[in-house]
Structures are given as structure tokens and as C-alpha cells.
Image (spheres, helix red, strand yellow):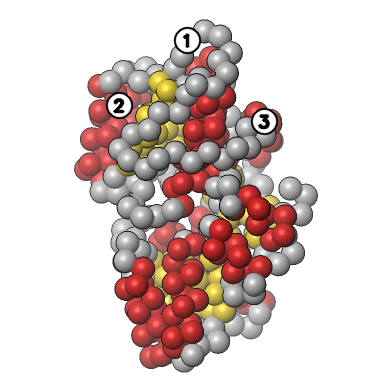
Amino acid sequence: MSTRKFWRGAAVGALALAFAAACSSQGGAQSQPGAASSGGGGAVTGGKNYTIAMITHEQAGDTFWDKIRAGAKDAAATHGIDLKYSNNENGPENATLVQNAIDSKVDGIALTLSNASQVIPVAQKAVAAGIPVVVFNQGIDDYIKAGSKMYFGSDEDLAGQTIGKKITEEGGGKALCIIQAQGSVALETRCAGVKKTFANTENLQVNGADLPSVQSTISAKLQQDKAITHIVTLGAPIATSAIAAQGDAGSTAKVITFDLNKDAAQAIKDGKIEFSVDQQPYVQGYMAVEALWLNLTNGNDLGGGKPVLTGPSIVDKTNIDQILPYTQKNTR
């Protein structure tokens, strides 16, 4: 980890202590997609076997969430936790999943706040019912409103600013920031962060669930606007579509991405992607479950009232050789 360029938040000490537990479980086993999955069967340290619900805004076909689930399952297996995973990208349905978890009397809830206005009132009901809530991945500005004492994720604004600074240093002309899910606060924040430190940034909305459409939309934009020198994608699958679009359009614009998968990691190795700003989703999934277990069994709260940052962590040609193998196992 010493080779990573890793910006730490005020609460990173808490993460280091807690993540020591995660290091004992590096298997990265992937859960099966679906409405719910059960992660258990690992060593139980004694006492009650807990049931934890994990509820996310996962969009169908987005492999990013495989890493979240892998981390969550590994933590659940370590402590003999029955993990119930469910997801819906739409706010009302997302809120219903939280209410279902309350009604089934789970012991803890880990959730994302992409749909904050709909989900926060239901999360507050969970806390009022005595169910601890941990927020991860999205909701850094809203997790306290939801009644959660803990948040695990990246600072999206800082991550975006990091990219903007890099483009400025390279003397970039114009950046195109690709948003693949309409209405996502985190994605909008990323692009806004880029624009803060590189003013000539334009957003382009695409449908992340339709990658051929993503490719054609980016290609058309590149052909129409030859001033674009950098393409910023907000997810690894979108980055691979951007590379293909770049070829279609005959563009020399550099590709920068948020997040990693094995294809994006290989593209960094091959020089097709300049670098990735990684939020380390495996850690987010692992720590969300681990933190709930610590709270339920020992009354612990991590972070000292501040978010525990899992990123931004830069992955580029200087450290890709170290990280590439882990992308094959869904632990990056």
C-alpha cells in the first residue's frame, strides 16, 4: 500500500485499525446477483448470529457492485453474519427495501444514499427502532441526517478536483465528463469537482445501462468537438466504451476514469487509460458490514464523527503492476 498516492481524511486512523480485520479475509468471493444473497458460514466468534441487510442503488449490469458485494460477503463470512443484499436504482423502491429490512427485524442496515430524499426518512425509522445504520459509497453529506454515525466512501468532490488538477498540469484544452446515471448526486459531484480545478469541462449525459449507445454518443461528440483533449469517465465500463469511441472518432483525447475493473486496469497497463481515481469499493463493502458487527458486539463507532475515506486513490503506470492481480479477484 505504500506505493499508492492516497489522500487520507481526518478519520483514516480508524480505518487502518478496522481494516486490519479485513486483511485476514482477502478471498474476494463474489456473491451472486439478485434481490438477496446470504453470506455466512464463516467462523463465528461466539454469541448471537446477526442478520445484516445491505441495500444499494445498484444499476443492472454495473459490475462495480460485484466488488462491494465481495467485500460485504467476506466480512459476513468472517463473523457468521447472515447478509441480505438487495438493490434498486429508483428512490421509492430503494426506500421500500429499507422498510422491508425494518419489518423483517434485521440487526443492522448498511445502505447507500444515492436517493437521499426518499431513503433518509426510512433510515431514520430504522434508527428509531433500535437498528444501527451505516452509510457507504454515497451519502457523505447526508449520512448524519439519516441517523448513521458512520460513513465509508470517497470524497467525490476531492476526487474530481484531483483529476482537474492533473488535466491543468498537463495543459489540457477541454475535458468531457461523462455521466452515466441521470440524477446521481455522486456522479454530478465528481464532474463538478473536475470543473472546480479545470474550468473548461463539459458534461455529457449517457445511458450507462446501454454501452453500445454510450460508445456511439461519445464518438459523435468527439467528432463534433475537436477541442476535447481529455475524456473523464465516472465508471470503469464507461471507460472501455470511451476507448472504443476514441478509436471510432479518430480522436487523440486522453481517457481518465473513476473506479476500476480488470479491463480498465489492463487498459492502464497498456497505456490506453492515463489513470484511475479508485474509491476501493471492496473496502467499502467490507467495512460497512465489519463496522456494524463491531457496533452490535462491542458498541464501537468508527471515524470519530467524521467520514472514513476509502479514496480517492490514484492507480496509474507507477503502481498498476501491484494492483492488477487484485482486479481479477474483485478485491479492487
* Kind of residue at disc 2: Ala
Mark 1: which secondary structure? loop
- Side (left or right) of 54 relative to 230: left
- Side (left or right) of 301 relative to 192: right
Circles 2 and 1: CB atoms closer than 8 Å: no
The first of marks 2 and 1 along the sequence is 1
* Kind of residue at disc 1: Lys
Q: Say which residue label 2 marks.
A: 101
Mark 3: which secondary structure? loop
- Side (left or right) of 299 relative to 88: right
Dot 2, how many residues are within 10 Å of its Cα: few (below 14), some (14-19), or many (20+)?
A: many
182 or 220, nearer to the observer: 220
The first of marks 3 and 1 along the sequence is 3
The residue sitting at 39% across, 37% down in the picture is 111
Dot 3, how many residues are within 10 Å of its Cα: few (below 14), some (14-19), or many (20+)?
A: few
Q: Which numbered disc, 2 or 1, marks the residue closer to the eye? A: 1
Q: Say which residue label 3 marks.
A: 24
Residue sitting farthest toward the right: 2
Residue 138 in view (yes/no): yes
* Kind of residue at disc 3: Ser
Distance from disc 2 to disc 1, alpha carbons, whole Å, reads 18 Å
Question: In which quarter of the view is residue 214 placed?
Answer: bottom left
Q: Say which residue label 1 marks.
A: 48
